[in-house]
Amino acid sequence: MITIYHANQFSDNEKGYTKVATVNVDNISDAFRLTNNIGGSWSKPATFTWDGVEEVNEQYDDRVEVLVELPTDDAGNAWGLRSTSSGDVLFDGEDYWFLVPIHCGRDGKFYDNTHGQTVKISNFDISGFEYADRLSNSEYIEKAQKMWYDNWVKLGSKDQGTCVLGAHIDSGVGRINPPPVQGNVSKYESAKVVMDYLDDQGISWRYDDGIMD
């Protein structure tokens, strides 16, 4: 089950949120898709009346439960909610995911490094929260490689295991290279601190064992 929080002021993470819906799916990608208006209204019922005429909502999906009352105009027509978009937050039951906007609201600070990305956050507050823009990809790579090297030294600068070439970590921010060690065991064991760090930052990764020399 995914919970959808819409920013009260579009793209502004500091002005509070409203819990608008839950979506009975297993991942935030499907929840995002099902709460976007594409050829219909994701938030309206299967049929609704507009200016006295009954309409069929082609986008209705019974996996979506709307948690707020839809606004109405002077004629009594109910307007659907906007699409889930930049500045909004999705909760997957364990983690909160922020759809990073270009900047905080109309005139707020820019999020140069992560705008357009979906980033796991740990400080979500329905009344609003501050977002510290993440490092750039090159800064992440530099930090991760130093972390890997420092941990290898901390573990005794050992060179254990089979000699391999090209071992590295493929990540969502780019290729992360190991310290100057050939043994596959030492490379992998010292890399665990980097793997944990990437997990904590919500960055995908895959360890590549390289090839035997």
Image (cartoon, grey):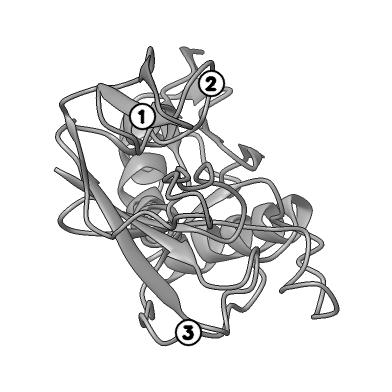
Check disc 3: other Cα within 10 Å, few if <14, some if 14-19, many if 20+: some
- Against 110, residue 16 (above or below) is below
Residue 154, quarter of picture: bottom left
The answer to whether marks 1 and 3 mark residues whose Cβ atoms lie closer than 8 Å is: no
Count of all numbered marks drawn on residues in the image: 3
Judging depth in this view, the residue of 2 and 186 nearest the camera is 2
Judge whether 76 appears above or below 197 on screen.
above
Mark 1 crowd level (few <14, some 14–19, many ≥20, 10 Å Cα) = few
Residue 186 in the image: state x and y as whole percent. Answer: 36, 45
Which label lies toward us, 1 or 2? 1
Q: Nearer the viewer, residue 142 or 97?
A: 97
| Drawn side of residue 80 relative to residue 106, left or right | left
Cα distance in 3D space between marks 3 and 2: 28 Å
Q: Relative to residue 184, is residue 84 depicted above or below? A: below
Q: Position of residue 10 (x, y in %)?
A: 64, 64
Circle 3 — which element?
loop
* Residue at image location 49% in from the left, 18% down from the top: 210
* Res. 193 visible in picture: no
Residue 204 position within the rendered picture, expressed as x and y whole percent measured from the top left:
45, 39
The residue under label 2 is: 38
Residue holding disc 3 = 128
Q: Amino acid at mark 3?
A: Gly
Q: Earlier in the sequence, mark 1 or mark 2?
A: 2
> Disc 1 designates what residue?
49
Viewer-closest of 97 and 74: 74
Question: What's under tag 2, amino acid-wise?
Answer: Ile
- Residue at the spot x=51%, y=28% of the render? 167
Which tag is nearer the camera, tag 1 or tag 3?
1
